Image (cartoon, helix red, strand yellow):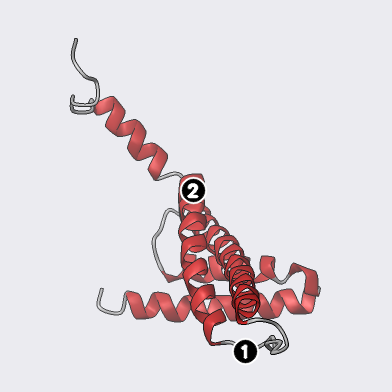
Amino acid sequence: MSNPFTQPPTKEQKAAADEFTNSCVFKAGFSGIAGYGIGLVFGLVLSGIEFSSPVDTSTSTKQQIKTVFRDMGTKSLSSAKNFAIMAAIYSGSECMIESYRARNDIYNSIGAGCVTGGTLAVRTGPRGMAAGCAGFAAFSAAIDWYMHRDD
C-alpha cells in the first residue's frame, strides 16, 4: 500500500488549495495570526522599555521580577490582540474591496484603511470614526505608495 503523503497532489487538489488560500476568509485569518505574533514581540519589546508601573522596593527581588514579568506578559498579550484585530480587519476588507472592484491599486488600500480606522474607532462616535478612517486611509496610502513606487 502506498503512502498518500508521498504522492504529488492532483490538479484538482492544487486548484482547491489555491482557491482556499486566495479566499478573503483565509487572508484575514492568516493576517490575524501573523498580527498576533508580531504584536506579541512588539509588546514584549515595548513593555521592556516602558516604566509605567513603579517597582515596589519593599518586596524581595524575586517578587519584583515576578511582578515585572507579569506586567510584560499582560502588555504583550494586549498588544498581540490589538495587532491581530487590526491586521484581520485590514486584510479582510482590502481583499473584499479588491474582489469587488476587480482591480489591484492604491484605492483598495485607502478603502481598507478607512474601514479599519473607522471600525477600530467605533466606540468614539462618528467624529472619532471619521478621524480614524482618515488617519488609517492616509497611512495606508503612504505605505502602499512607498511599497509600489518602483512599479
Which of the 4 image quadrants contains residue 4?
top left
For label 2, the residue is: 24
Identified at 64% across, 80% down, the residue is 64
Please state the horizontal and vertical placement of residue 116, each as a whole percent of the image: 61, 67
Badge 2 amino acid:
Cys
In the rendered image, the quadrant that contains the N terminus is: top left
For label 1, the residue is: 51
Q: Nearer the viewer, residue 108 or 41?
A: 41
Q: Categorize mark 2 by other alpha carbons within 10 Å: few (<14), some (14-19), many (20+).
A: some
Let me know if residue 120 appears in the view.
yes
Let me know if residue 100 appears in the view.
no
Element type at mark 2: helix
Residue furthest to the front in view is 60
Please state the horizontal and vertical placement of residue 114, each as a whole percent of the image: 60, 70
Q: With 125 as the anchor, is 101 left or right in this view?
A: left
Q: Nearer the viewer, residue 77 or 133?
A: 77
Mark 2 or mark 1, whichever is nearer to me: 1
Identified at 49% across, 78% down, the residue is 45
Height in image: 43 above or below 29?
below
In the rendered image, the quadrant that contains the C terminus is: bottom left
Q: With 79 as the anchor, is 131 left or right in this view?
A: right
